[in-house]
């Protein structure tokens, strides 16, 4: 609680600086359109899901996004990536914790997990910390992995994400960032939760090298 309060205080103190700099920050274009993210990623085979309605896109304030479903022989995962070229004038990343309850999903478990990934197919392995939630609507359960990404930096904490946005605006005149969310249905059979966790982490490992092709570094 002390750490969260300290981070919140830093955010408040930096708000005036952030607002002044963010207003003059230039949008950072995406490297490659998200729509070009491959439908075949390792052992995962994907399909494109319908676009959001114009009202939802307007509420999100996102500059580019994709909604996909990927599957291998044992699991199905959902993927959402939303990219913000500039977080100015209210166009800021919406936390899934704010959006999911509006769709009827209730978080029943919240923690973070470390996933070893490569930033490029031949790059070195590094650990990233991401959020891992279990959400429930009626009898349906899903496991959600999500994180904030900017300049090849992965942040799980929403508070630290805002702090880094302020620092990037000050140092680089940039406020671009992306939200990456992976969802995995959890079955009712024994061991389903563990399999959902393994499937989600495995997909994140396959996906991550592809993101650097599209998101600004």
Image (cartoon, rainbow, N blue to C red):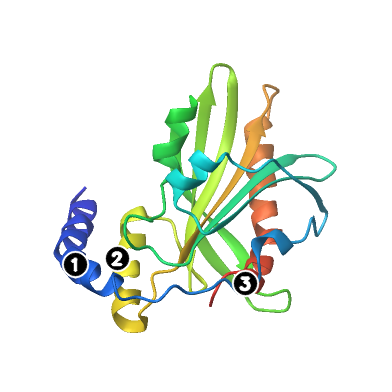
For marks 2 and 1, give the CA distance: 8 Å
Which residue is outermost to the top? 138
Front residue of 166 and 139: 166
Residues tagged 2 and 1 counted as in contact (Cβ below 8 A): yes
Q: Distance between the residues labelled 3 and 2?
A: 22 Å
Q: How far apart are marks 1 and 3 (CA)?
A: 29 Å
Asked whether 134 or 66 is in front, the reply is 66
Answer with the quarter of the image where residue 166 lies. Answer: bottom left
Q: Label 3: how many residues lie within 10 Å, few (<14), some (14-19) or many (20+)?
A: some
Q: Which residue is drawn at 54% across and 16% down?
A: 138
Question: 188 above or below 88?
Answer: above
Q: Can residue 105 be seen in this view?
A: no
**Residue denoted by label 1:** 14
In this rendering, is residue 138 above or below 184?
above
Query: On the image, numbered disc 2 is attached to which residue?
Result: 163
Left or right placement of residue 62 versus residue 2 in this view = right
Q: Crowding near pointer 2: few (<14 within 10 Å), some, many (20+)?
A: many
Q: Position of residue 146 (x, y in %)?
A: 52, 50
| Residue 176 placement: quadrant | bottom left
> What kind of element bears circle 2?
helix
Q: Where is residue 62 in the image (x, y as percent from the top left)?
A: 49, 55
Q: Can you identify the residue that label 3 sits on? A: 212
Residue that appears at 67% across and 21% down = 188
């Amino acid at each position: 609680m002390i750490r969260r309060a300290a981070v919140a205080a830093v955010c408040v103190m930096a708000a005036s600086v952030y607002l002044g700099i963010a207003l003059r920050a230039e949008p950072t274009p995406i490297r490659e359109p998200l729509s070009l993210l491959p439908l075949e990623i390792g052992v995962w085979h994907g399909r494109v899901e319908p676009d959001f309605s114009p009202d939802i896109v307007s509420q999100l304030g996102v500059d580019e996004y994709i909604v996909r479903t990927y599957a291998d022989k044992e699991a199905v995962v959902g993927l959402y990536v939303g990219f913000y070229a500039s977080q100015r004038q209210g166009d800021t990343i919406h936390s899934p914790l704010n959006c999911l309850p509006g769709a009827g999903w209730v978080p029943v478990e919240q923690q973070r997990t470390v996933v070893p990934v490569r930033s490029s197919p031949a790059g070195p392995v590094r650990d990233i910390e991401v959020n891992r939630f279990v959400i429930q609507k009626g009898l349906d359960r899903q496991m959600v992995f999500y994180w904030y990404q900017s300049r090849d930096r992965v942040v799980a904490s929403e508070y630290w994400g805002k702090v880094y946005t302020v620092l990037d605006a000050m140092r680089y005149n940039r406020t671009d960032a992306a939200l990456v969310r992976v969802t995995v249905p959890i079955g009712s059979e024994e061991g389903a939760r563990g399999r959902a966790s393994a499937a989600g982490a495995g997909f994140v490992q396959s996906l991550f090298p592809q993101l650097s092709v599209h998101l600004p570094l």
